[in-house]
Amino acid sequence: MMDADVAPARGARGPALASVWADRLGFFVIWTLAGFALLLLIAPSLIVVMISFTETAYITFPPQGFTFEWYADLFSRQQIVESAVTSLRISLWSTTIALLLAVPAAFSLVRGRYPGKTFAGALIVAPQMIPGMVIGVALLFFGAYISFRQSDLMLVLGLTVFCLPFAVRLVMAQLQLLNPALEEASLSLGATKKRTFVQITLRQIVPAIVAGAAFVFIESFDNLTVALFTASPRARPLAVELYNLVQFDSSPMVAALSSLEILLAFVVMLVLGRTIGLERLAK
Amino acid sequence: MTEAFWTRFRDGRGVWPAVPAFVFLAIFFIAPMGVLFSFGFTEIERGQVQENGFTLRYLTDTLSDDLFWWVWWKSFYIGTLSTLLCFLLAYPLAYLYSESGRRMRLLILVLTISPLLTSAIVRTYAWLVILGGRRGVINSTLIELGLIERPFRMLNTDFAVIIGMTQVHLPFMVLPLITVLAARDRNMEAASLGMGASRLSTFFRIVVPLSMPGIVAGLTIVFALSYTNFIIPQLLGGGGFTTLAVQVYEQIVVILDWSKGAMLALLLLGSCFVFILMIGLAGNRVMRWSVKETVE
């Protein structure tokens, strides 16, 4: 089946006029949608950052005046500072554990030769297919079963499960890119196996490890879906605190806190861009 | 350390470097999932599992409850609409990426990845600000311009939830599409154009079918995320707004009926997998059909 405009005969004179206009209109729609998508991606964050500087006591757009008052207010609230510290501590723990588990696992999954490797790989990235809420709920119920309560430790464990697949996949991708000739050269030039491993192999995957750490850190820091079910009610992480603030506080201070989180996201993005490149992250 | 140790580590020859990760997942992921599953079929009173508590009561009660089906339909419809809207916006953007130079590509990547790394609450909060009451960005702008006199009610509607989900999940749709579109084989397009097909026809008959794997990946991820999201419906949908995922949260955290919550979570997860499978199968069908269509 072929439409008239697909027929090859017209090639020499170019397509008919009507089809040229259809083309223009069609691509006008496509580019407009693309522009709208870009706007949708950036506008919300921009608006939040803008209103965080307003001089009014309520959120308003466009913001009026310019003040850092809300940022000062933010740091004077002990509860927020404490929950930020809690989040920081928890994220550092989950990042450390996730990487300690992920790096060796990635080696095994890329370079190992054993039956059932495909299955093993699928198992390790399985948590990625389960929503954070379900991971959190499952851990909460499991804890009830063995008398293990919601706590910082439970949250760290939940976040590690949630983030492990990202870390494993980042390191695996880097390992697959390595050129084995470099390791062979090092060995044949007389380096010991240990030295070859540390100076050649490990050094080449450092970018992926750093990127993985940055990614796991920010995912843990921002996570709400696991945290709502596993975090200790006494030491609430920042994400849970922010979740409550967003619902019940209309002060621009919430926008200031949000702006700081946006800033953190940009820092992490810079790290990712410098280590493995943003294109790689797309995969 | 012996030489053999380093050789084995470097070559990863064998399972053992992955064993700690397996043990960890077995204890803190597989076992909890098993407990979750069993809780859906167990009598629990005051957080205590009862003796000989196996029951199908929660399953049959839930499935025979009209409210459950209503809530399920809401989840399905919100998830589907926001996934389609995501696709409608993401595809043109990913196509723009594939047709752009280095600088534009970097800009698109930065704008796509930065929201991905920003907390979802922050981005949902932005919608509270944009859609909210009289002082919301949209209403205040429209009033200022004299286009309307009284503010529209935008917050606490289906529309608010759908637009919020679309924005929060957009990067997950854009990234897989970017991957397939940027790497696509451009010879087929050149051939199509050379044989006299219009650009638009080439776009729909060559470019779109070629990107089918990315489309399926994007639709799958975004549907799964939208279908199971309970934060955005709670924040943008208002108090009365409920979906299956919101129900899970409320049963477990507010009402503390863990068995019912576990059953709802299992049904949420199970139905999500079924839909994902259906998207995959439909994608395969379309791919085969479009290849046949083009060849014939």
Image (tube, rainbow, N blue to C red):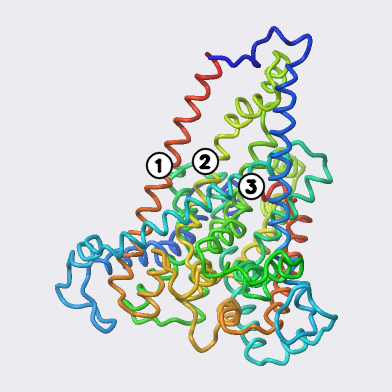
Few, some or many residues within 10 Å of mark 3 (<14, 14–19, 20+): many
Question: Callout 1: helix, strand or loop?
Answer: helix
Residue on which the image places disc 1:
B278
**Residue at the outermost left position:** B52
Judge whether A84 appears above or below A208 on screen: below
Few, some or many residues within 10 Å of mark 2 (<14, 14–19, 20+): many
Identify the residue at horizontal 54%, vertical 15% (top origin): B295
Q: Is residue A190 rendered to the left or right of residue B70?
A: right
Q: Earlier in the sequence, mark 1 or mark 3?
A: 3
Q: Nearer the viewer, residue B49 or B150?
A: B150
Question: Callout 3: helix, strand or loop?
Answer: helix
Judge whether A142 appears above or below B243 on screen: below
Chain under disc 3: B
What's the CA distance linking mark 1 and mark 3?
22 Å
Q: Nearer the viewer, residue B210 or B9?
A: B210
User: Which mark is in front, 3 or 2?
Assistant: 3
Figure disc tally: 3
Residue on which the image places disc 3:
B89
**Quadrant in the picture for residue A78:** bottom right
User: Which mark is in front, 1 or 3?
Assistant: 3
Residue on which the image places disc 2:
B216
Chain under disc 2: B
Q: Nearer the viewer, residue B76 or B154?
A: B154
Q: Amino acid at mark 1?
A: Met
Q: Is residue A196 visible?
A: no
Do the numbered discs 1 and 3 sit on residues whose CB atoms are within 8 Å?
no
